Image: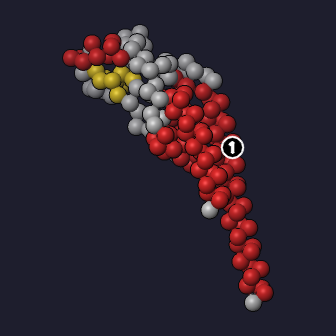
Amino acid sequence: MNVLLVCLIFWLIFSIMGVNLFAGKYYHCVNTTNDETFPIEVVNNKSDCLALANDSARWKNVKINFDNVGAGYLALLQVATFKGWMDIMYAAVDSRNVELQPQYEQNLYMYLYFVIFIIFGSFFTLNLFIGVIIDNFNQQKKKIRIL
C-alpha cells in the first residue's frame, strides 16, 4: 500500500508539472470536412480560426491532454504504458502557447519532460512496484516453509 502511495505521489508531481507546462496548449484549428489541422500560415491563433468558422473550421482540443490534474494522470498512464504516447508527446512539442495554433517542433525541450517521466515515472515506479510484489511473494513462501 505504501508503494502505491509513493508511486501515485510521484505521478502527481509529473501531472502537476504537465498541467503547468501544457494546460490549454493542445488546442488546434481543424478543418471539419477532412479533419486536418490548418497550417500555421493560414491560422495562427484562435481568433483566426473562429474567423473561418463559416468555412467549416473548428478550434478543438486533443482527446488526451493536461488541462487538469486528472486528465494529466490519464495522459501519464498512456505514456507509461506506451499506448498512444507519441501523439501526446508530439502535441506537447508542437505547442506554442494558449490559444495559438501548434507549430512543428516549436518546444523541443518538452521532449525532456517525457524522457524523464519514462525513466523515473515508468521504469522506476514499475520496478519498485514489482520489487514489492516479489518481496511479498518471498515472505509468503517463507511462511509456508515454516508451517
> Looking at this rendering, what residue extends furthest in the bottom direction?
147
In this image, 115 relative to 30: left or right?
right
Q: Can residue 87 be seen in this view?
A: no
Residue at 51 percent across and 28 percent down: it is: 22
Which residue is the site of mark 1? Answer: 120
Query: Dot 1 lies on which element?
Result: helix
Quadrant holding the C terminus: bottom right
Q: Where is residue 123 in the image (x, y as percent from the top left)?
A: 68, 48
Q: Choose top left, top right, bottom left or bottom right for residue 43.
A: top left
Q: Quadrant of the N terminus?
A: bottom right
Q: Observer-nearest residue: 56 or 131? A: 131
Q: Is residue 25 left or right of residue 29?
A: right
| Placement of 75 over or under 105, stated as above or below | below
Colour setup of the view: secondary structure
Quadrant of residue 106 within the rendered picture: top right
Q: Which residue is drawn at 63% across and 24% down?
A: 109
